[in-house]
Amino acid sequence: MKPTLLDCTLRDGGNQNDWQFTAADVHTIVSTLDAARVDVIEVGYRGGSGSKVSATAGPSAHCAPEYLAALPAVSHAELAVMVVPTVCPVRAVDDLPYSPVSMVRVAAYPWNIDGVPEYVRAARTLGLKVGVNLMAVSYTTLEGLAEVAAVVAGEEPDVFYIADSFGALTPDDVRRRVELLAERLPTPLGIHAHNNLGLAAANAVAGLDAGVSWLNASLCAMARGAGNLATEQAVAFLTAWPTYDAHADLPLVCEAAEYVAEQVLPRPMTVRRAEIAAGINDHHFSFQDRIEKISARHGLDPWEVGRRIGAARPHKVLDETAEGVCRELAEQTEQTNGGDA
């Protein structure tokens, strides 16, 4: 088996440094990964991230024509951008055939997947490869995932990814979802794993065992919160494992990772209490700071507040969301204590 490896450092890694990659960073990352024979290099978002709005974001947050034109030439890798339909109009990809980009990945949540087919058709009409990235897959039941598959099946994208956006899945969760999709989609499958529970590599391997043939990863695991499967670790286990036909050059990939660790990352990637809490409670990491502050104001356990928020599977967590959960929990606690008295 020869998995396709997609590195998303310049796209997802931007959540760590506000997409402030220098021209030297971009050149070094793209050139080194290309020389290492990584299959696809995702160079950023076209039109912005759907989950992190920033007025100061760097060039890879938008992939303007001048940014794409300045990318170094590649001889092995394909270059890709991600498009989020809720923030990027479909016509905003019309110029991509005149750029070095050959692939568009369309990212959507289960609750707005209906907008994806239009973007898939538009990218294909332009002669581009196209992938679909289903974010927050942990928020779908198997029945809900089957409905998502039905929406995109007729479009036959070049790859359909499940993204464990909150780092909440276990290998068993991954297997069940991949097996269901393999039965319903006539297209290669991929996985984007986050490491909140320390399971990014294990989930990637579970996905490969169940039928996934594309892996997402980023150098040094660079991404928000606990980060992704690390590109260098993915290449390492694919190289060490005879089951897989690894073709990327591990020393060169490690060279790229060392550059990111020393020159790009604003701080080392860590998996501490906040990252683990977001994963075990199954909600977006960006909500965790808000949950902890509001819980403290109410004198409540942030783990329990986070658990209730994750169980509700909200599309967004605003201050009012956390305040409402805290009020409900405080009332229940008061009633229980009163009953005990």
Image (cartoon, rainbow, N blue to C red):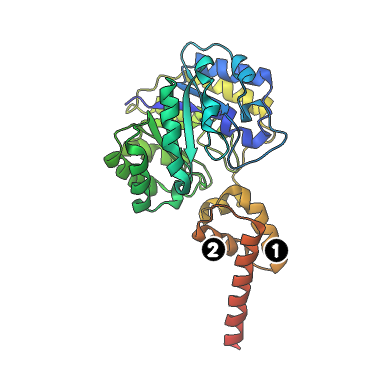
**What residue is shown at x 52% (from left), y 26% (from top)?**
93
> Circle 1 is placed at which residue position?
296
Question: Residue 73, image x and y in percent?
Answer: 55, 11
Question: Residue 170, image x and y in percent?
Answer: 42, 48
Question: Residue 195, image x and y in percent?
Answer: 52, 42
Q: Residue furthest left?
A: 183
Amino acid residing under circle 1: Ala
Q: Earlier in the sequence, mark 1 or mark 2?
A: 1
Q: Quadrant of the C terminus?
A: bottom right
> Circle 2 is placed at which residue position?
308
Q: Which mark is residue 60?
A: none
In the rendered view, would you say 336 is above or below 263? below
Assess disc 1: are there few (<14), some (14-19) or many (≥20) residues with their C-alpha within 10 Å of its C-alpha. few
Q: Report the front residue among 58 and 9.
A: 58
Assess disc 2: are there few (<14), some (14-19) or many (≥20) residues with their C-alpha within 10 Å of its C-alpha. some
Q: Residue furthest front?
A: 91
Any part of residue 295 in sight: yes
Q: Report the front residue among 268 and 102.
A: 102
Secondary element under disc 1, as helix, strand or loop, is helix
In the image, 235: left or right of 316? left
In the rendered view, would you say 303 is above or below 249? below
Question: Residue 294, image x and y in percent?
Answer: 69, 61
**What residue is shown at x 54% (from left), y 23% (from top)?**
254
Q: CA distance from mark 1 to mark 2?
A: 16 Å
